[in-house]
Image (cartoon, rainbow, N blue to C red):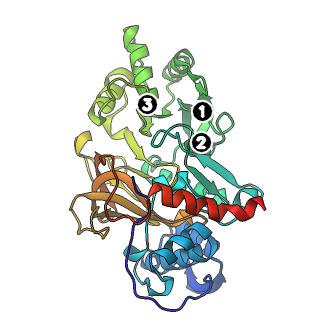
Amino acid sequence: MLFFCKFRHPRAGLNSAPRRDIIVSGPSGGPPPPIRRSRMTIHEQVISFINSSRPELFASISIDVFRHQYVAVPAYRKYCDAAGIDPNAVSLPDEIPMVSTVAFKFAELCPPDSDRIPGARVFLTSGTTVGRDRRGRHVVAHPEVYRASALAHLRRMMFPDGGGIRMLALHPTADRMPESSLSAMISWCIEEFGGGLASCAADRSGLDCDTAVRFLREAQRDGAPVCILATTAAIAALFEHLRSRQEAVVLPAGSRMMDTGGAKGQARPLSAREVVEAARDILSIEPRFVINEYGMTELCSQLYDATALNSDRDVPPEERMKIAPPWMMPMAIDPITMRRLPEGETGLLGFIDLANVHSVSAVLTEDVGMVFGNRVRMLGRARAGGARGCALSIDQFARLGARAAAPRSA
């Protein structure tokens, strides 16, 4: 299995970490204010872009973020140097060298001591790709960037009507599982879009279906819409719990479900169609309100199903595409050449996520799909074995990560 993806660029000189003039917009939703220019740090640039989403600025900011990360992240800089990549020669977003999600298991892909910054969060993966004893580690030095990204796209995709409804989490919240990036997002979602009453029916030991059903029954009685936030496995467990008792819940109109994926523990994972149909038949949630989220520990931004709730698309669940936010660029990557494929061709999915400003923004996943602008059609997981175009093996990168981490223990 392989990690880093090799790109070729001519050599040139290196500039220091960028600080640049950028256009700052006013509050979203209204007409643009008079343009003013301000000196901003790379952190401020990204926050400003998330809040204003000026598409014409994405390319320049993404290059600035890459050059900043080359300087600030030792393991990433070592990789770029070994691969002959010079930051000044990178002029387009799709030329930014990508890091496999697997690499987060073997090195600190962040500036030194980022985890010691007050308020920093360290998120861990489930650790199933290369054994449970080695878990991917994503240090988010400034969680406010992750929060801004998560809430802005949730507002568009899950709560275009404003939210303010009851919330039921079938996955532990951040106070119960602080190392989970999903738990952080669920907690922020409840805080931002909840309408007062909320319940978490899960902890590290598992899901309490009785608590979940009681909460849903109360919402049915009160005529109050509910948003269910859950992994696919938790949703399947709730459905099975109700089916085994031959029960159903009639949730009020406007109720919705965010299916975050994750089928661990299921003998046969539910398909997208099965989740949507069961939510309709067992919970009375309309299909357009059942939305699958695509995200991972290694990315601070997420994609969501395009449905009639949030877009002009109304297609069967298995034909849905996922929409990326304006501060994320999805790409299909040829696994042999490691180059970006034309729109509509099948490849490994890669993303440039500006919300990853304090780690590595260009991330190559193990998922396969097609890209159409900011929309992604998910096709499944890549077969084991890695892409031939990658540059460093596990052993090589493990040694590189160990060398990069050595100064911290001195």
User: Is 116 left or right of 349, judged from the image as shown?
Assistant: right
Q: Position of residue 229 (x, y in %)?
A: 50, 35
User: Is 243 left or right of 146, judged from the image as shown?
Assistant: left
**First of labels 2, 1 by sequence position:** 1
199, 58: nearer the viewer: 58
Q: Where 6 falls versus 172 (above or below)?
A: below
Which corner quadrant holds the C terminus?
A: bottom right
334, 331: nearer the viewer: 334
Q: Position of residue 29 (x, y in %)?
A: 50, 65
Farthest bottom residue in view: 13
Marks 1 and 2: in contact by CB < 8 Å? yes
Indicate which disc residue 264 carries. Answer: 3
User: Is 74 left or right of 257, judged from the image as shown?
Assistant: right
Q: Position of residue 318 (x, y in %)?
A: 24, 41
**First of labels 3, 1 by sequence position:** 1
Indicate which disc residue 180 carries. Answer: 2
User: Which residue corresponds to the image point at 43% horizontal and 14% vertical from the top-left?
Assistant: 241
Q: Amino acid at mark 3?
A: Lys
Q: Where 388 falls versus 94 (above or below)?
A: above
Q: Which residue is labeled 1 in the image?
A: 172
State which quadrant residue 26 falls in: bottom right
Mark pair 2, 1: CA separation: 9 Å
User: Which residue corresponds to the image point at 67% horizontal and 33% vertical from the top-left?
Assistant: 176
Q: Where 235 falls versus 58 (above or below)?
A: above
- Of tags 2 and 1, the one toward the viewer is 2
Q: Amino acid at mark 2?
A: Ser
Indicate which disc residue 233 carries. Answer: none
Callout 2: helix, strand or loop? loop
Mark pair 3, 1: CA separation: 15 Å
Mark pair 3, 2: CA separation: 15 Å
